[in-house]
Image (cartoon, rainbow, N blue to C red):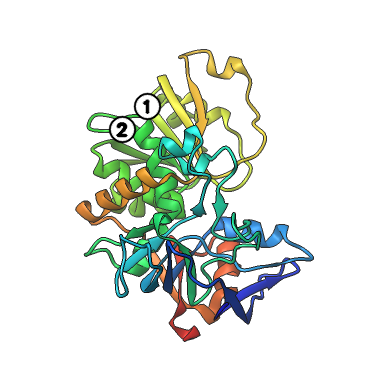
Amino acid sequence: MRTTTGWQSSGGSTALERVALERRELRADDIAVRVDFCGVCHSDLHAIHRTAGRSLVPGHELTGTVTAAGPEVTRFAAGDRVAVGTIVDSCGVCPMCRAGQENYCYEYPTLTYGGVDRVDGLPTLGGYSREYVLREGFAYPLPEGLDPAAAAPLLCAGITVWEPMRAAGIGPGARVAVAGLGGLGHLAVKFAAALGAEVTVLSRTPDKAADARALGAADLLLTTDDQQMEQARDRFDLVLDTISAPHDLKPLVRVVALDGTLSLLGYLAELSLTAMDLLPGRKKITSAGTGGRTGTAEMLAFAAERGIVADVEVLPSAKVEEALTRLERGDVRYRFVLDLSDLA
């Protein structure tokens, strides 16, 4: 086994401990990656809080450098810059995998952390660590020109908003609304604007209006203003709901256009809607979970072409508890990223 160092949560605590971790020896198609940066996602917080009584090494949006490669690896060599997202394996043969949507694998994809390795049955340990070992097919070349710290959140937050936009055919002339201007939402604004859409941010308060416009939005609409919401009725081809807390969906449905779509990306729980809420205007409701290999590669290429990265605050990984605590209270614009070099 290979030995590295990482940050581990025990008993559901956000006070992570620095521990020695074991990674597998390289299989024939594996690469070893020195993790340089790893984003801190709301999913990490949720996972930590769900694991009372167990240990967990979070982290599923990471960038780094290849340090070693198995004998059958053809796409990477030592020294290559790479990015790794939320899944590190899948069955490879089901209809979803064959369609390039490994994130929806019928046998369930192997998650970057909190999953089970398909070969040895051991739990997967995430990117809050100095080294990660994975199959080369689930790593992506990190395009030149993308800052590795600011690019890390593209591998979860970025692809999560990218795939619904591509599925909805968003391009020039489309009208897109983004509810919530956090880690997902700010990247949704950037991508939608770069695709040529007219973008509006939906917010309860006006305090992020300047940020919304700086990110590429044309306007900010107050969801607490009944007159503004009524004027926006049936307006948007796609509403990307990135809000991570419970909230009323009906006001968002009302601003979806004829044959438009509300895509739920932030709070994935029971819905408080009926068919009658969707009937006027033939409105659709959908969701998405990160992305497959095809979409992720496309998203990274587009990001490199347009210079799109996340707005990040980089912290030494030793401050991971601070990052998680501040994230829980919403004190970040817009994504924390851990610098793992202090684990060297």
Does 209 sit left or right of 248 as displayed? left
Say if mark 1 contacts mark 2, CB within 8 Å. Answer: yes
The 10 Å Cα crowd at callout 1, few under 14, some 14 to 19, many 20 or more, is many
Along the polypeptide, which appears first: circle 1 or circle 2? 2
The picture places residue 15, in percent across and down from the top left corner, at: 66, 75
Asked whether 244 or 102 is in front, the reply is 102
Where is 15 relative to 203, above or below?
below
Q: Residue at x 27, y 36 (%)?
A: 197
Asked whether 224 or 258 is in front, the reply is 258
Image depth: mark 1 or mark 2 in front: 2
The 10 Å Cα crowd at callout 2, few under 14, some 14 to 19, many 20 or more, is many
Could you say which quadrant of the image residue 222 lies in?
Answer: top left
Residue 237: image tag? 1
Q: For marks 1 and 2, give the CA distance.
A: 8 Å
| Three-letter amino acid code at the position of disc 1 | Asp
The picture places residue 210, in percent across and down from the top left corner, at: 33, 53
Could you say which quadrant of the image residue 269 lies in?
Answer: top right
Residue 170: image tag? 2
| Three-letter amino acid code at the position of disc 2 | Ile
Where is 256 relative to 143, above or below?
above
Secondary element at tag 1: strand
Residue 222 appears in the rendering: no
Could you say which quadrant of the image residue 23 lies in?
Answer: bottom right
The picture places residue 268, in percent across and down from the top left corner, at: 60, 41
Asked whether 314 or 199 is in front, the reply is 314
Position of the N terminus, as image quadrant, is bottom right
Q: Residue at x 25, y 40 (%)?
A: 195
Residue 166 appears in the rendering: yes
Secondary element at tag 2: loop
